[in-house]
Structure formats: C-alpha cells, structure tokens
Amino acid sequence: MPPACNPDFPRYSSGRGRDSNPRPVAPRQRKRERGRGSAGPLAAMQPRQLRWDTLEALRDSSKGRLKYCRHWLRDEDVLEGCMSPLTLSSYSGWVLDRIVERSDQEITPSKTSTPNKSTPHTNQLPLEKVTSASHQGSSPLSSTVLSETKGNNGLSLLEMDQEVLPTLLPSKVTEVEGCIRMYEEMHRLKGKEGLRQRQEQQEQMVRAVYDLASEQLKRFDELKELKQHQEFQDLQEVMEKSLKETQGQQEKLKEEHRHRAKVLNLKLREAEQQRQRQEELERLRKEEGQERLRRLYSIQEEVLQLNQQIDPNYRHKDLPKIDLSAYSSRGNQICGLVSGLIRTTSERGFPTQMDVANTERALQEMRGLISSMQQEIAAAVEEKKRRDEEEERQKQQELLKKSQMKAQSTAPAQLPGGKQTKEGLQVKTDESIMRWYQELQDAANQCVTSFSEISNCKDNEVKKTKMDLQKAATIPVSQISSIAGSQLREIFDKINNLLSGKSVQSGGRSVSVSQHPQGLDFVYYKLAEKFVSQGEEEVASHREAAFPIAVVASGIWEIHPRVGDLFLAHLHKKCPYSVPFYPAFKEGTSMEEYQRMLGYQVKDSKVEEQDHFLKRMSGMIRLYAAIIQLRWPYGNRQGTHPHGLSYGWRWLAQMLNMEPLADVTATLLFDFLEVCGNALMKQYQIQFWKMILLIREDYFPRIEAITSSGQMGSLMRFKQFLEECLQKKEIPLPKGFLQSSFWRS
C-alpha cells in the first residue's frame, strides 16, 4: 500500500519527511483547549498559560507551519497493520524468483573476488525485504517498506540492516530470518508509534468531546434558563391576561350593577310618580268629596233656613188665620231627609254626585214649598204690611238722622273726570265697574266650562295629561325670583312657548297644549290662578317678590290677553277690594259664605285671623300695583300696556269715593301707594298731589273715625307715609324695584 493511502502515516502537503517533533495542534483544537482552560479553576491558570505558550511556540516553528490532511483516518484503522494476519502479495513469487536469480549470480563472482569487495547493502535490502515479505505474506507492508526506502535515504531500512547485521549471512535462511526479525522489529516500533499517536488522538478526541460536552452543558444551561425565562414570561402573560379578564369581568359586573341600579332607580321613580299621581288623585277626590260635602252642608243650611220661614211659632205667630202646620210637617220631613243623606254620606266617606242631586231636589222641593206658603199668606202679609208701614217710616227717619250725624261736613272726593259725589260717600261700586267685574267672572266661568271634559274625565291618560299641563304651567311661576334677569327670561320663554303651542320639558317629559283639545283653556286658567296665588302667598311673605312676578305676568298678559282677563277674575274673587267692591250681606246668606265673599278663608267653620287676612290682601294688592306699572322689557314697546296706570288711577279714585272699612282701607291704600305711587306721580303729576292732599285732609279723618284702638297700627303707618311724601314732595321708588342693570345679570 502506498504511503499516501496508508492510515498509519499522516498526509503532508509538502514533500518533507516525518519528524520526531509532536504533531501540530489544529486551530479548532486550540480553541477548545482555550475554552477548557478558561473554564477551569483559578489554581490551574498558570500551567495552562504555560501550555498555551508552548503551543504558540510550536505553531511558530517550521513543523507547525506544515499543512496536514485532516481526513487521513476516515477509512482505515491505524493498528490494522499490526493486528491483522500477515499475507503475501500475489507478486511475492515473482519477486522471490528474481531475487534468488540475482543472488545466485552475485554469489558466483564473489568466490573469485576479494572478500572485501562485496555487493552494496542497498542491493541486498530488497532481497531481505522481499524474502521477509514472502515468508510473512504481507503485500501492503512490503509496498510500504519499498516506498519508505525510496522516500527517505537517511532513515532507510537498509542502513538499519547494516547497523544490526554488518555482514550478510551466507545462507538464504539466515537472510530471510533476519529480514523477518528486522521487519517485525520495525513493525513493532511502527505499531508502538501508531498506538502512541492513537492514544494522543483519543486524548484529543476525549478533550474535544469534553469541550463539546462542556459547551453543550453551557448551551443546555442557557437553554434551560431561556426556557425558564420564557415560562416566566408566559406565566406573567397568562397572569396579565387573567388580570385583564378579571378586570373586564369586574367592569362588566360594575356596568351590570349600574344598569340594574339605573333600572331600579327608574322603577323607584316610576313608583314614586305613581304614588304621587295616586296621592294627587286621592287629593282631588277628597277635594271633590269635600266640595260635595260643603255643598250638602250649604243645602242643609238653606233648607233649615227655609224651614224656619214656615215655622208658625217663629215668624207668623201673629197671623192666627193662617194654618202652616202642613207646610211645617213637610218642611220637617225634607229637613230629616237631607239630614239623613248627610249622615249616611258622612259614615260612608264622601258624598257622591247622586247624593248631591238628591239633596238639590230636596232643596227645590223646599223652595216650592216656601213659594206655595208665601202665596197662601200673601193676603195676610199685605194686611200686616199696612199696619207696619208707619213703623217702617219711623225707623227710616231714625236711620237717616244717624247717618247724617255720622257724616262730616267735608269736601267730597274728586273723580278723574272732575265729577264730585253728593253729600256722603258711596256704599256700592259704580255700575260700569260692576259690569266689568261681572264680565270677567262670566269669562272665568265660561273658561271653566270649556275644559270641563279634561277636568272631569276619569281616563288615566287624560288625567296624566292634565297633571303634566298643570305642572308645566305652575312650576315655572313658582321658580320666579329676582336672582338674575337671564333666569327670569328663561322662565318667561318657557311659559310663552307652552301657551304658543310649542313643546316644553316638564318633569323629564315633553308637554304641549296640543295633547288635548281643551289643553290651552286649562293652562290659561291654571296659569292665571297661579299668578294670583303667588301674590297671595309669596308676595305676602316677601314684598320684593312682587316685581319679578309682575313683570313676567305683564309680559304674558301682553302676548296672551286671555291670561290677563282670567288673572283679574281670580284676583277679584279672592280680593274683592281690588275691584274695589264691598259685597253686601243678603238675606239667606250664611255668615261663613259672607265671610268668603269678603275674602276671608273659612276652614271647618273657622274664619282666619284678621292679621293673616290683611297680609294676604296686601300681597295681592301689591302684585296688582306692580303689574299696572311694569312691562316686559323684551316685548313690543310700541303698543300700550294691556292694563296700565289708568286702571290704577281709576281704582284709587273709586276707593276714595266709597266709605272706608276699618283696618282694611288704610292697609290697602298704603300698600298700593308705596308700590305704585312713584309711577302715578310721574304720570299724573299735579292731579296726583291733589289726590294725596285729599286723602290726608278729607279721607284720612273718615278712616280714623271708624278705627278702633286695637287697629291703629295700619292707620299710623299710612299717616306717616303721607306726611313724609308731602314733606319731601316725592314718593320714593319701592324697595325691590327692577333696575335696568338687573336685566344684564
């Protein structure tokens, strides 16, 4: 086998022979050794550094610069030549014959030659080797030896042979045996060298494997650490995802909770609204029942009064010719019937409309009974009347004398047109004013009749619409204040939009008068009633509140005149002195009813106190005095006031032309002049001051004459006001008057 293919020899890129120096270390091997050296403990640093120095020196040597074939051990084993049995090549016979022939030829001349002249050792070597090879039967080994002898003359086997065997044995056996031994020795040394190289290679492989294992262990640790880090990251991501999901669930639960709370609030609000509606319906039902009950009581009172007229022992006892027992019995039966109905309804709760109709029929029957009785006793009464004429004339003369003594010789009050009354003052209001008063009351009654369907309907939807309209009309009026002009304008716009047919928001719902055909009339009536109630309650408690309420009422009145008419009707009904009008007591009228006609509040047959009555009257007169002098600043300034100062002048003149009332006249005149006096002074100037002088000189003594000692408070307050105004020749602006700066707030 040639040396290039023999695995026992390394392959060199140059033609130089083998060297006794150690084999250079490959660069990859050096890197592994460096890696291994760096991974060792600190105590081994110095020997390793020495190794590195040695390796560096070897690398820089001539041997270290040789290039080796790295794959010379890929196909054959190093110890194959030592461990495999020796065989002869197929050419061994031919070589042996040639060697034997040559040796015979050389032996024959040697016998004649000098013993010192012998064949060179180089010619003998092939024979020895071939012979040894023939005996051993190793073809690869012989070729290796031949190739080696050609490549290296200094270390050839021939020289070794000359050193060991200086002389050739004479016999072929000895020569062959020597060759065999020499070959065995050479093969043994070669095997030993190969084994050493194999061990070194194994050590290098072990070191490489160790380094590789160390690197793999490091990579494994790094991979493990990376896996742990990834697992930690995955776990963290899972935790974050779980946290997000938990937060999402919490948000969802919160949203559900808010939704449920909202639904619950809506339900509670609906329940509260339903309860309020039920309470309102119950209140209305109670009011209707109380109104029917009051109607029953008034019918009962009238029936009892009529029954007293037919009592023979009460009124006609001096007419013996007339028998009134039948009328009395029937009257008693009717009274018992009415009393029974009232007792039954009281036990049941509130009377029904049927009960009221039955009592009214009983009243009509009682009236018919009285009419029949009156026709029967007409003749007897005429006779009685003739006897009493003289007495009546005497009584009238006495009354006339008393009235003349009571009247004082003072100048009569002057009217705006310059007319003067006759001696004494009026007791009744002028007919023109009374006609105007009656027209307003008829208009109010007609308005009530026009929305009777929406007022008396039992349908829940209609009732709900009625309540919404009533709230939309009355709540903004309750919110009127003197805080800011912008707020007052918002309230005005809301009321105006409602009356104009537009939709407005009230209680979270959209409300419009177009929801019912009678809605507009109903809103007109309730709005006017609310304005009067604000004067009766709010202005009575806070006098400055009269001006913001009056300016809104005046603006609404100017755009919607029907509201003004209804306002006057409500005002005249609750405060007849705003006409002015002193209701007269009529025969057959109960004292409670008469007190109501005068403006008093009667509850459970109990009349309100005089101070509270005067406070309410004062509030309504103050509101009326503020309305006649104020106009809405954002309205049409070209038109006239729908109810201006001329009506206030007429009211003042009419008051002074009527007999004063104790405690009432002084209070109302003071309130009216304090609120409206400045505007009247600017409008009428000299005529106004003449009126003030007339009040102080002529009318004030009349008031003082009828005022008792316990009612002097209002009189002295009025007197002080008159004296201050005449002394300063000016009436100051009332407190709370709305200046121009108010509308910029």
Image (cartoon, rainbow, N blue to C red):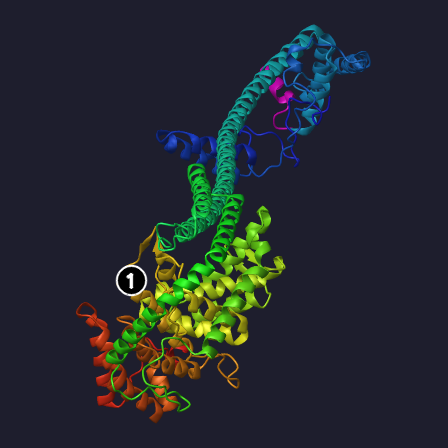
In the picture as drawn, the residue positioned furthest to the front comes out as 321
Looking at the image, which residue sits at the far left? 709
Up-down: is 673 above or below 263?
Answer: below
Reply yes or no: does residue 157 show up in magenta.
yes
Position of residue 634 in the picture relative to residue 701 (left or right): right
In magenta, the rendered stretch is: 153-166
* Residue at point 32%, 85% (across, down): 423
Q: Quadrant of the N terminus?
A: top right
Q: Is residue 632 visible?
A: no
For the residue pair 723 and 631, the one nearer the viewer reads as 723
Task: Assign the C terminus to one quadrant of the image.
Answer: bottom left
Residue 217 lies in the magenta stretch: no
Residue that badge 1 annotates: 612
Closer to us: 69 or 665: 665
**Rendering coords of residue 339 (x, y %):** 42, 42
Quadrant of the image occupied by residue 676: bottom left
Image point 30% across, 66% down: which residue?
Answer: 615
The foreground one among 314 and 322 is 322
In percent of width and height, residue 23 lies at: 55, 30
The quarter of the displayed image where residue 27 is located: top right
User: Badge 1: few (under 14), some or many (20 or more) residues near its Cα, within 10 Å?
Assistant: few
Q: Is residue 363 left or right of residue 182?
A: left
Q: Secondary structure at mark 1?
A: helix
Q: Position of residue 115 (x, y in %)?
A: 67, 16
Return the residue nearer the eye: 513 or 86: 513
* Residue 154 placement (x, y as % from top left): 61, 28
Q: Is residue 720 visible?
A: yes
Q: Is residue 324 left or right of residue 444?
A: left
Which residue type does callout 1 highlight? His
308 over 131 or under it: above or below: below
